[in-house]
Image (tube, helix red, strand yellow):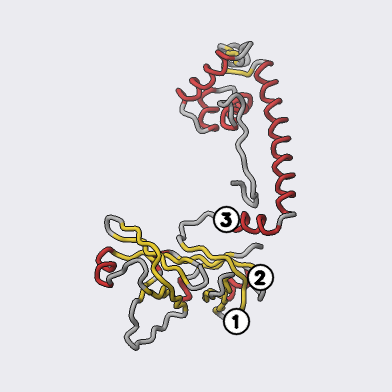
Amino acid sequence: MSEGRLLDADLKLAGRLDARFFALLQALQDTGSINRAARTAGYSYKGAWLVLESACNLAQGPLLETATGGVGGGGTRLTESARALLLAWRALQHDHQAFLRGQEARLARIPALHGLLRRLSMRTTARNQFAGTVSALTVGPVSAEVSIALKSGDEITATMTSAAAKRLKLKKGKEALALIKASAVVLVTDFAGWQLSARNQLSGTISRIEAGAVSSLVVVTLAGGTAITASVTNEGVDALGLEVGAPATAVFKAYAVMVAAQA
C-alpha cells in the first residue's frame, strides 16, 4: 500500500501486462539496452527476454527493433506500436489513480470505516495493536508518560522521550495506537501477595493457546473484550498450568509500549 493511501490496487492488462512490464518498456526506451533495462525493472536478462518475446508474439506488430552497430551504435528500441502501448498504459494509470483517490474521498465520508482502515494501514510485527485516545500526558525535561484509553475501557500507559512525544504531537483526546510485542508481555496467574513495578497490569481470562515447537502464543481476553497476546515458552505454559478459561494478568512495562499517532 502506498504511503498515506487507504486503497490500493494493481492495474494489469490482459492478466499479464503489469507495472513491472511497462517499467521494462520505459527502461528500454530510455537506455536502448535489454541488459540495463532488465536491471532497472528488476528482471534477470533471461526473464526480460522471456516476457518481451511473449508480448511480441501476441502483439499485432513487432514491439522491438534492433540496430546493429553503425554511427548511432547498436541496441534495442521500441517500435511505434510499443510506444503507443506505453502511452496507453500511462493514460490508464492516471485514470486508475484518479478513481482510487475518488473512492478514498468517498470513504472519508464514512468516519467509522475510514478510521478503521487508517488504523489497519500500519504494517508492523508487533502482535498486540490497540487503538484508543490519549487520556493523560505528562511531559518532563527528558521523558514523557502517556496513557491511552481503549474503547473497551482498559488503559495502557507508555513512556518515551519528551522529544518523541513532541514529534508525535501528542495531546489529550488525540487518537493513538499502542503497540506491544508479545515477547514483552509476562503472564501472572497468582501474585501471592506480591506487587510488581510494571505499570501495565491487565487482568482477564485465557481464551486461546496456540502451541508451537518451542513457545506458545497465549491470548488473554480482558473484561472489556480486548485480547492481548503473550509469547510464553512451552515449559512456562506447563509450569503455570495455563489453560483456556483460567484467569491471568498480562503484565508489561510502560517502556515496552510503542505509540503511533497520525501527523
Mark 2, residue position: 174
Residue on which disc 1 sits: 138
Instruction: Check disc 1 and report its element: helix, strand or loop.
Output: strand
Q: Is residue 163 above or below residue 34?
A: below
Residue 16 placement: quadrant: top right
Distance in Å between CA atoms under marks 1 and 2: 14 Å
Is 188 left, or right, of 257 in this rendering?
A: left
Check disc 3 and report the residue beneath it: 120
The image position of residue 253, as x and y in percent, is: 44, 76
In this rendering, is residue 215 above or below 255?
Answer: above
Q: At label 2, which amino acid type do we have? A: Lys
* Residue plotted at (66% across, 70% down): 174
Mark 3 touches mark 1? (CB < 8 Å): no
Looking at the rendered structure, the secondary structure element under dot 3 is helix
Separation of disc 2 and disc 3 at Cα? 17 Å
User: Looking at the picture, which amino acid does disc 1 mark?
Assistant: Thr
- Distance between the alpha carbons at the discs numbered 3 and 1: 28 Å
Seen as rendered, the residue at the extreme front is 245
